[in-house]
Amino acid sequence: MSRLVLRDLGKTYPGAARAALRAVDLEVEPGELIGIVGESGSGKTTLLRTIAGLETPTTGTVTIGDRVVSRPRDVVPPEQRGVGLVFQDYALFPHLTVARNIAYGLHRMKRPQRMQRVQDLLELVGLEGLGDRYPHELSGGQRQRVALARALAPDPAVILLDEPFSNLDAALKDELRAEVGRILRASGTTALIVVHDADDVLALADRVAILRAGDLWQIGTPRELYERPRDEYVARFFGPTNIIPGVARDGVFDTPLGEVVSPLAAGNGAHVRLSVRPADVQPVEGGVPAAILRARYRGSFTEFTASVPTEDGRAVQVTGNAPAGVHLTVGQQIELGVRRNGVQLLAEG
């Protein structure tokens, strides 16, 4: 296990109008699993490639353990820095068996040790007995696990995974996500995983680093980012949400959806912006009046959009979830409320 440290890391491609990475500072503890997320073009893949040594930074350094492996005009070659990389398309050799794919980077080991290492990894990734098969004889999830085993084979200091679940269907993705987390934690390897799906980082990562236009926008545990997003960009990454104004008054937020009790409502009279998830907006007796604009039955609940009048004569639109037994129609007048503690305070309000 090794510590990974990025200091003032920047990357600007020749001819580019803006930097792909800008002054990224990140410390990853030994054995920690970091999820890297952000919209397309935010710099996720560039970050992985720079750590792996496939890109030279324009500014800053990459340090693995006690060794600086990347700085401008001085880059340790990828094969000499102890980094394993799992590509999005797995990049398995089709003409080699599973066992020989895993053993590919172990040519310096003596044959008995190499065979034992391969067997240990097959057991770790749950593919015992499949060493003689070829990649085309495996499922997508099995191929992903072979790619992970191959990356772990040389016992790297750091392992990087670039969108490992993007080619899998939903059911297989859920299963493999849990399996990858188990494998990485069992190996004890420091890991960075680039993902698109919020469910992936919530289920896998010890901490989440959110990139935005090349900047490290916010980092924290999944709970910290979900409950205290820096701004609307971070809040919306974790799924649909309503962004509404509020005024904090001693444990209560005054909002267009009524009073919401929350321990986040410190101070008296502070104007803030709040994130309210649709699951926390529900029809309630004695709530604020609203008119249904859209309603969609989703099986276990009905998703709706409603217009809520405000004191200044305007209206705000909010999305909420009603229990499946509540029938809603367009134009229907209802009363809405927010569940207790059902708001997240945007740090940059």
Image (tube, rainbow, N blue to C red):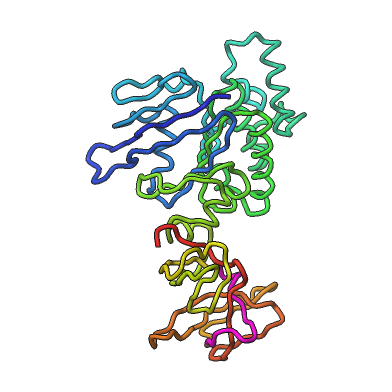
Q: State the residue at coordinates (28%, 37%).
A: 13
Based on the picture, tell me whether residue 289 belongs to the magenta stretch. Answer: yes
Q: Quadrant of the C terminus?
A: bottom left
Rendered residue at 56%/19% (across/down):
105
Q: Nearer the viewer, residue 219 or 143?
A: 219
Q: Nearer the viewer, residue 73 or 337?
A: 337
Left or right, 225 with reference to 45? right
What residue is at 38 percent from the left and 48 percent from the top? 41
Quadrant of residue 337 within the rendered picture: bottom right
Q: Is residue 171 above or below residue 338?
A: above
Q: Residue at x 58, y 70 (%)?
A: 261
Q: Quadrant of the N terminus?
A: top right
Give the number of callouts: 0
Q: Position of residue 342 (x, y in %)?
A: 58, 67
Above or below 218: residue 324: below
Residue 208 x/y as whole percent: 52, 45
Name which quarter of the figure residue 304 lies in: bottom right
Instruction: Left or right? Give the position of 53 relative to 15.
Output: right
Q: Closest to the observer: 138 or 285?
A: 285
Residue sitting at the far top = 110
User: What secondary structure predominates along the stretch shown in magenta?
Assistant: strand
In magenta, the rendered stretch is 277-290
What x and y, as percent, mark residue 98?
66, 28
Q: Residue furthest right?
A: 129
Image coordinates for residue 295, horizontal then vertical, percent: 57, 81
Task: Reply above or below: 247 against 336.
Answer: above
Identify which residue, 137 or 160, lies in the foreground.
160
Does residue 105 show up magenta in the picture? no
